[in-house]
Amino acid sequence: MLKNDDLYKMRISAHYRGATTCDHCGTSIKNIVEVRGNGKTGNIGQQCAEKLGFDKYQIRQKLTHDQMKQRKAERKEREDAKDAKLERERVAIDDELSKRMASPVGEIVLQLEKVTFNCDQYLCRDDYGRELFLENDFRYSLAKQLRIRPLSARQADFVSKFVAGGQSQRRNKANSDEWDRIWEVCVSDDYNGITYNFLNSIK
Ligand SMILES: [Zn+2]
């Protein structure tokens, strides 16, 4: 006989029609719920299974042990296929992102990050004294966005200002070429702009 303490550690391994007695209450049963766990196995009736709180969905399913096994194998196959798909997508994303970073965009992203990290006012310290970078920093946010997609014209203005503008952060004769070049690169779809579409396509 199986006691409640035993049964709470068990799970349903099959549910099928047959004829035997319940290992829990001793009555004769036709709807046999086969349970396993903790090194034990047994057969209990559907009513006992429901009272004991076994998964209702599983109790309702009348399957043979082989069908149950097959179902499990199929589920595992589906999950493996899903994992493989996610992994392929992850690799494809990494590939697309590194293509974009290898284009002129990459250099601007790095320059923007450098400007941000070198700016003392945006550094703070955590409880351990480690220097922390403020995640919500506007320049860092621009760099993060530029990494994956073209920026808006207005955002690109700021990147030119931060990267080419120097101390004054103004456009002048000396920096105008670089200022304009950076702006063009930031808004352009040419530099693996496919990245942006690609990322959207797999979401
Ligand atoms: Zn019973």
Image (cartoon, rainbow, N blue to C red):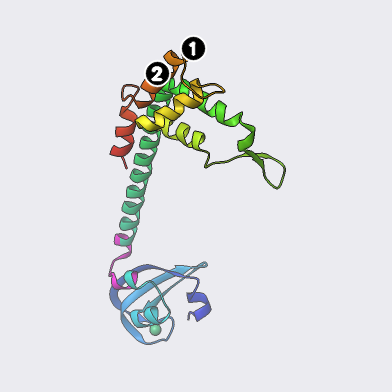
Above or below, comparing residue 18 to residue 85 in the picture: below
Please tell me which of labels 2 and 1 falls first in the chain: 1
* Dominant secondary structure (helix, strand or loop) of the stretch shown in magenta: helix
Q: Position of residue 20 (x, y in %)?
A: 34, 80
Above or below, comparing residue 196 to residue 69 in the picture: above
Q: Who is closer to the viewer here, 182 or 193? A: 182
Q: Who is closer to the viewer here, 152 or 63? A: 152
Is ligand 1 less than 8 Å from the beta carbon at label 1? no
Q: Mark 2 points at which residue?
A: 180
Specify the quadrant of the image occupied by residue 118: top right
**Magenta residue check for 65:** yes
Residue range corresponding to the magenta coloring = 58-67
- Alpha carbon separation for disc pair 2 and 1: 12 Å
The label nearer to you, 2 versus 1, is 1
Q: In this view, does 35 lie to the left or right of 133?
A: left
At label 2, counting other C-alpha atoms closer than 10 Å, the crowd grade (few under 14, some 14-19, many 20 or more) is: some
Query: What residue is rendered at 51% in x and 75% in y?
Result: 6
Q: Position of residue 87 (x, y in %)?
A: 39, 38
Tag shown at residue 112: none
Q: Mark 1 points at which residue?
A: 174
**Magenta residue check for 53:** no
- Figure quarter occupied by ligand 1: bottom left
Above or below, comparing residue 71 to residue 137 in the picture: below
Specify the quadrant of the image occupied by residue 86: top left
Question: Is there any visible trace of residue 103 in the rendered image?
Answer: no
Instruction: Indicate the amino acid at tag 2.
Output: Asp
Q: Who is closer to the viewer here, 38 or 100? A: 100
SS category of the residue bearing label 2: helix
Q: Who is closer to the viewer here, 146 or 55? A: 146
Instruction: Indicate the amino acid at tag 1.
Output: Ala
Question: Is there any visible trace of residue 68 in the rendered image?
Answer: yes
Is ligand 1 less than 8 Å from the beta carbon at label 2? no
